[in-house]
Amino acid sequence: MTTDNLKYRNNMVQTQQYIADHKDRFLSELIELLRIPSISADSRHKEDMVRTAEHIMADMLKIGLDHVTKFETAGHPIVFAEKIIDKNKPTILVYGHYDVQPPDPLDLWESPPFEPVIKETKIHPKGAIFARGACDDKGQLFMHLKAVEAMLANHELPCNVKFLLEGEEEVGSDNLGDFCNAHKERLQCDVVLVSDTSILANDVPSVTVGLRGLSYVEVEVTGANKDLHSGVYGGAVANPINVLCTLISEMKDDQGRITIPGFYDDVEVLDQDVRDEMNKAPFSLNEYKSALDIDDVMGEEGYTTLERTSIRPTLDVNGIWGGYIGEGAKTVLPSKAFAKISMRLVPHQNSDTITALFKQYFEEKAPESVRVKVTPHHGGAPAVTPTDTPEYKAAYLAMKETFDKDPIPVRSGGSIPIVALFEEVLGVKTVLMGFGLDSDDIHSPNEHFGLFNFFKGIETIPYYYQNYTELKVSGENGH
Ligand code: BES
Ligand code: MN
Ligand code: MN
């Protein structure tokens, strides 16, 4: 079957009308959700996490979902809900996260991060909602609730739906793996549907078909047993900040390749024609540079920017500290230096293996004059989704319907570690049908989400349900 000859019947007429009629309310409800500072990393917001979970649960009850449940975990609660209309119909599991990144640095926000405002931008002439979590991921998970509300209210829900929303995605999803293992039956489904990624542009729809994996470590370098006078001891005793900088800079060669032995051993090598195909995606290096105010890009030699941010692994320092950083000058030879380092991984690299290789390299390269400690943080496996499946085709057709353009499959550079786990534990594929833009400043000050994108998402999701159900029931692709 090709997707082109699928006869299209729009069974979502009333649902679409309902969405058009309720846009203002949908938006004001999203604003209320964005007001709660659900910062998972900050223990001072533990109560806000509970409040956010309960706020979402109240909405789930209102729109008519069943078995709305809050599961306590060692960390933040997991929210589950479902609507089973017919056990013989396919089941879509919607995954999303209601936690957000810390808003710091606060002084770079043009409006407070938890007081949403709507402003027009060059890229979002119809307006965008500015708030932490607007795009990643409260705004995007809320599209799913509103799409399901619209289908339920109009008796047009064509299949079963389950919601699995967590509050720990931004801190490594520590408790979700155990939860999935313990609740396999409850989570049983045919496909996982996630909106937590981007499209290429508002007039260039795309479906994400790959995510990078992650290995995240913290390193500590210790020199002398106390801070010293940098005149009295400087030049004779190792400066851990200097040593750390050297160790880090030696981890990449002048071709931009990572020097850790064995780092590339498992990296998937793509044929040139596959790479050529990827590079056909609309992309302007000049626009990319000017949006970031940089005169040039930097990365691994022999690869384009699109390839560097999707099919190639990376190593980046996310934070580095030590010594005196207060006002004025203090002459000191610090005792310790620290850094947080992330490595983005591609198929078929393994996060534990890469962390072990990093640790070994870092310990071996460190001079006798310092002691080093490497502490692994969270990790996650990369994921790629095939495009010749009903799961993917349903997304393709849904976006084609609402954007009136053929969506392009693209691999993204970000990570959602739980995707690989869904496949492992639940045995199902995940479809990444996100509606954000890479320029929406997720994790940065002034995060925003286009109103066009928010409503386009709500409109597209019902078509996913319709297409997926039809493709599954008609038994396409051997199912
Ligand atoms: N939604 C993002 C991941 C993402 C963003 C994928 C844009 C594709 C395009 C997610 O919330 C996230 O930030 N993930 C973290 C990893 C996690 C283990 C902290 C990331 O990618 O840094
Ligand atoms: Mn996210
Ligand atoms: Mn995120």
Image: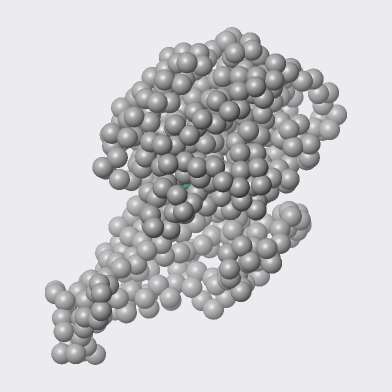
Outermost right residue: 5
Q: Residue at x 63, y 33 (%)?
A: 455
Task: Count numbered badges in the picture.
Answer: 0
Quadrant of residue 183 within the rendered picture: top left
Where's residue 302, x and y in %?
66, 70
Q: Residue at x 57, y 10 (%)?
A: 85
Q: Using residue 195 as the reference point, say whether residue 387 is left or right of it.
A: right
Where's residue 273, x and y in %?
76, 57
Tell me, yes or no, if residue 333 can be seen here: no
Where's residue 277, x and y in %?
76, 54
* For residue 369, above or below residue 151: below
Where's residue 386, x and y in %?
66, 40
- Camera-nearest residue between 218 and 45: 45
Q: Quadrant of the C terminus?
A: top right
Quadrant of residue 256 within the rendered picture: bottom right
Tell me, yes or no, if residue 454 can be seen here: yes
Q: Quadrant of the N terminus?
A: top right
